[in-house]
Amino acid sequence: MTFESLGLSPEILRAITDEGYTTPTPVQVQAIPLVLAGQDVQAAAQTGTGKTAGFTLPILHRLQPMASSSPSPARHPIRCLVLTPTRELAAQVQESVKTYGRYLALRSTVIYGGVAMPPQVKALQAGVEIVVATPGRLLDHVQQKTINLSQVEILVLDEADRMLDMGFIPDIRKIIALLPTRRQNLLFSATFSEDIGKLSKGILNDPATVEVARANATAMSITQLIYPVEAERKRALLTHLIRTLPIPQAIVFTRTKHGANRLCAQLEKEQIPAAAIHSDKTQSHRTRTLEQFKAGEVSILVATDIAARGLDIDQLPFVVNFELPHVPEDYVHRIGRTGRAGSQGCAISLVSPEESRERQAIESLIKQTIREEIPVNFEVIEPARRPAERRPLREADGRSRTDRRHVTRPPEGEAVAEQVVREPKVPRPVQEAPRSVYSHHHFSRPPLGLSGIKKHREIPALLGGLLKKAP
């Protein structure tokens, strides 16, 4: 099947051809006709199978008749709202909208936190048909009355399971209450769960279900490996693998922000170009780091699960789990950064004995036993031993030298008489008590109370005499 057979407009087909795509993916084949028909859709597919294009292409086609080249903001009301859990995913969706809609007179913008609001307000005031947003910043605009959602015709929840995990559902319900009742609803995700099913029942209206692969399955194009290693040896093994496999470019996932910073510093110390990305970094830093990574200026991107979704990097060869995630579904999203769009990828996990429970949960989720590998030419170094306590030196006969024992040997045939002569103890010198800071060395005269000076009890009498002499 081709994109032409899906019924997309010539302008959209031209943009698809510019990107070098000729054949739609399975999720696109099933989802695009349903969205074009105006039906509510809930779709689940493996990460990296083209879900974003699965809803952006038909949405652009549906909005094309309403496109206008007029500069008037009134001719460009918001007709489509796409909600995403993270800033990176919002930026990725916005990039897809711009790419596939480059030949259409449709405007779009992205709004998320971590950056100044005035540029976003200016873009909204100019008029846009498509808004890609994170829930928190969108509600900020609603509160400040800088956005109007009264004409939204299409609502998209992208990575809905992640938004559920991050606690965005109350915000989403507030946003839905501001939208028109009659609208098309689309829910796209890499995984489905019971909670997602409950959420879809409250938002979608008689939806069509698209599930092109078993839920929580990993792509066949990804080779998954486990390297057993002690926790304290993970850094050394990672450096060894980067240099020996070799690993030219990879995203390395850690559990915590502090762990990402520490690992990044260690790699840079080993002369490996690395950069860290997590929620404590400013949005400008995160954007700049991703651009450097995509351009090949940085070979290793150390990240928390904030980068597990929404990053679409062409031909990324490796993903490394420096630490296994606590939530097994996050493993599916992490390794989904490689092996995208049919390319081959490799997912390596460094697993310590303490992570056996997380490993079992992941293998149970994906219904697959991950193959173990032994690193080549990587020696296991025993932990350094504590220095032994110094013991007194002994003579050949076993006697301590500290005792200074002397043995008097009589002529042959007589008994040996042993006499222990200890060196006399030398008394330690008695240190002189420190002089008081108020001694006579510091003043022109001795302090009060010493010999030859009137005592303290006589001071009031002296003062009384002085007072009497005053005129």
Image (cartoon, rainbow, N blue to C red):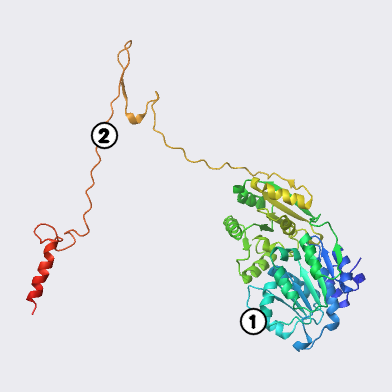
Q: Position of residue 458 (x, y in %)?
A: 11, 64
| Residue beneath the point at 71% across and 49% down | 359
The amino acid on which the numbered mark 2 sits, given as a three-letter code, is: Lys
Secondary structure, mark 1, is helix
Residue that label 1 marks: 118
Residue 191 seen in the figure: no
Quadrant of the frame with the C terminus: bottom left
- The numbered mark at residue 71 is none
Instruction: Decide if residue 82 is on the left or right side of residue 29.
Output: left
Instruction: Give above or below for 143 relative to 89.
Output: below
Q: Earlier in the sequence, mark 2 or mark 1?
A: 1
Q: Quadrant of residue 162?
A: bottom right
Q: Can you name the residue that lies furthest to the top here?
A: 413
The quarter of the image holding the N terminus is bottom right
Q: Foreground residue, 276 or 463?
A: 463
Q: Neighbour class for label 1 at 10 Å: few (<14), some, many (≥20)?
A: few
Percent coordinates x, y for residue 26 in the rendering: 87, 63
At label 1, the amino acid type is Pro
Q: Which residue is mark 2?
A: 425
Residues at circles 2 and 1 in contact by the CB criterion of under 8 Å: no
Q: Is residue 378 above or below residue 317?
A: above
Give SS at disc 2. loop
